[in-house]
Amino acid sequence: MPPKHATLSRALREQIRQGDLREGDKLPSEASLGEMYAVSRTTVRSALAELTSEGLIRSESGIGSFVRRRRRHRYRPQDDLGDTVGNPQADHFLRTEKQRGASQTITVLIERCPERVARRMGVTEGDFVVVRRRVRSFDGTPYSINDSFYPRSIAEGTEISDPHDIARGVNTVLTELGHEQVRARDEIYIQMPDPEEIQRLQILPGTAVGVHWVIGFTASDRVVRVVRNVLPGDRHVILFDREKSGGEPDVG
Amino acid sequence: MPPKHATLSRALREQIRQGDLREGDKLPSEASLGEMYAVSRTTVRSALAELTSEGLIRSESGIGSFVRRRRRHRYRPQDDLGDTVGNPQADHFLRTEKQRGASQTITVLIERCPERVARRMGVTEGDFVVVRRRVRSFDGTPYSINDSFYPRSIAEGTEISDPHDIARGVNTVLTELGHEQVRARDEIYIQMPDPEEIQRLQILPGTAVGVHWVIGFTASDRVVRVVRNVLPGDRHVILFDREKSGGEPDVG
DNA sequence: CAGTGGTCTAGACCACTCT
DNA sequence: GAGTGGTCTAGACCACTGT
């Protein structure tokens, strides 16, 4: 005999999968579920906690529990270099999304470099770097954190240090400064968000995040920037295209 | 005043972050944590459940709770096409990993096509397809699910339908059959695993997965295969490289 | 106001592991 | 046998939402 809480969570999971419970539907109250399945409220709550941690439902205090909706934005790592390739005009995010309710807040600071950034930038932990912190939102709800780190020697005193949109794109500015980014290395980690990310992104319990690092290089292999994007998994799909003739590096 | 369980989970999370509790370390028992923080065992368990769902700890019945270890394999989507580019010799996974304790189990079936595969392959749901299901393991612990779907008209009766390693790589076989894969479209979803994936991959609670779809096209834009990889987030980092001159499609 | 989910307690029994 | 985590109960108080 499986535990009662597992029986209950399986029953509810099946109802969601089958469509008996649809996106946005309200589940029966914890008390009624307890009566229906002849278990205590503690056991009901344990079953609901399981579904919550799977990202299937969401609970609102004083109201009830609901089947979660899922809508995803398309996220293309390749757009980061595309800035300076096809269309050298604008910050890709705003260029394509602004007319559809997108916005972003920008903060620029000069900070001591955290270890995980220093390691990727090839500088010493604690060196000063210029940091552009952005939270991108869509119709009022945040949907990604986008923190860019630039070596102080490259960015200080330039447009990059201003806390404003850079209409023609940061890659264009880097090129004008003689530090064109021609190559990028991407790393994607899949993990649960920490409390700070949960707060900044208004992440619901049971939502995983992708952490997408971009390390940008010049032709002479200098790191011109390190970007750390945090993408809530329930709001994104990561897309890219590859061609056999594209000369994929396939480095060991 | 924050809830007691949040105070306790924050204290423990901080000890892990600071290194007071290291990877593999045993936490105090639930009973002793209850005494130390003057809360009931239920409250202790609620705090530990939070840390478990964040992937920070793991509990073993009858033994105790431990700080989780994290080791990651490098996962390169670009290797999928690389098969037929640089080194047409072997299945990339085994070529590079076998000498280090890697193994895989293969099952080949002819099945009715699930909707999510049919949509990507451009066939009708319920059409028959050849499915190669693999679970890749490393030193005895599974680390990814790799299910490949081929149109029946291409794969039936060929080497692809044999449940064996294909030493020179499936891409090579496709080329020999006149269906060379020259282009691929990648989609990555970040989500919590479902119970079947938890079981097949022995996934611990609090571990998110990446679902990596690859849609392979011929030069005439026919889909030659659809691959669905499931990657436990705690065992992988996804890597790729990009070059400005690489002719990135940047398709809208 | 009644109903909901959030928190918390004290206590119980079980299966399991380690010594 | 002692200790551990897993399960489960009955009951309590709270803050919050709706009517």
Image: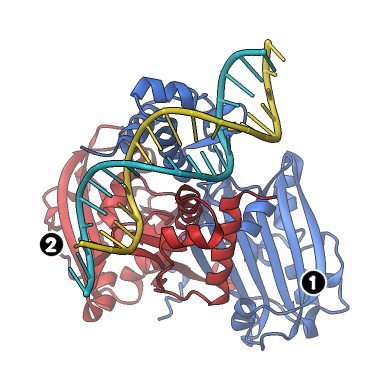
Chain colours: A red, B blue, C yellow, D cyan
Residue B189, how many percent across, how many down?
A: 50, 64
Quadrant housing residue B147: bottom right
Q: Vertical placement of B236 versus B149: above or below?
A: above
Residue D12, how many percent across, how many down?
A: 31, 41
Q: Which residue is mark 2?
A: A164
In the rendered structure, the residue with mark 2 lies on which chain? Answer: A
Q: Which residue is mark 1?
A: B173
- What's the residue type where badge 2 is placed? His
Q: Quadrant of the C terminus of chain B?
A: bottom left
Residue C7, how many percent across, how many down?
A: 32, 41
Q: Vertical placement of B170 versus B61: above or below?
A: below
Q: Vertical placement of A186 versus A25: above or below?
A: above
Asked whether A198 or A75 is in front, the reply is A198
Q: Residue sitting at 59 percent across and 60 percent down? A: A10
Is residue B191 among the parts visible in the rendering?
Answer: no
Residue A133, how many percent across, how many down?
A: 22, 53
In the rendered structure, the residue with mark 1 lies on which chain? Answer: B
Alpha carbon separation for disc pair 1 and 2: 53 Å
Q: Quadrant of the N terminus of chain B?
A: top left
Quadrant housing residue A55: bottom left
Q: Vertical placement of A90 versus A61: above or below?
A: below
**Kind of element beneath mark 1:** helix
Is residue A216 among the parts visible in the rendering?
Answer: yes
Q: Which mark is residue B112?
A: none
Asked whether B209 or A11 is in front, the reply is A11
Q: Position of A222 compared to B59: left or right?
A: left
- Counting other residues with Cα less than 10 Å from the Cα at mark 2, is it few (<14), some (14-19), or many (20 or more)? few
- Counting other residues with Cα less than 10 Å from the Cα at mark 1, is it few (<14), some (14-19), or many (20 or more)? some
- What's the residue type where badge 1 is placed? Val
Q: Position of A35 compared to B203: left or right?
A: left
**Do the residues at discs 1 and 2 belong to one chain?**
no
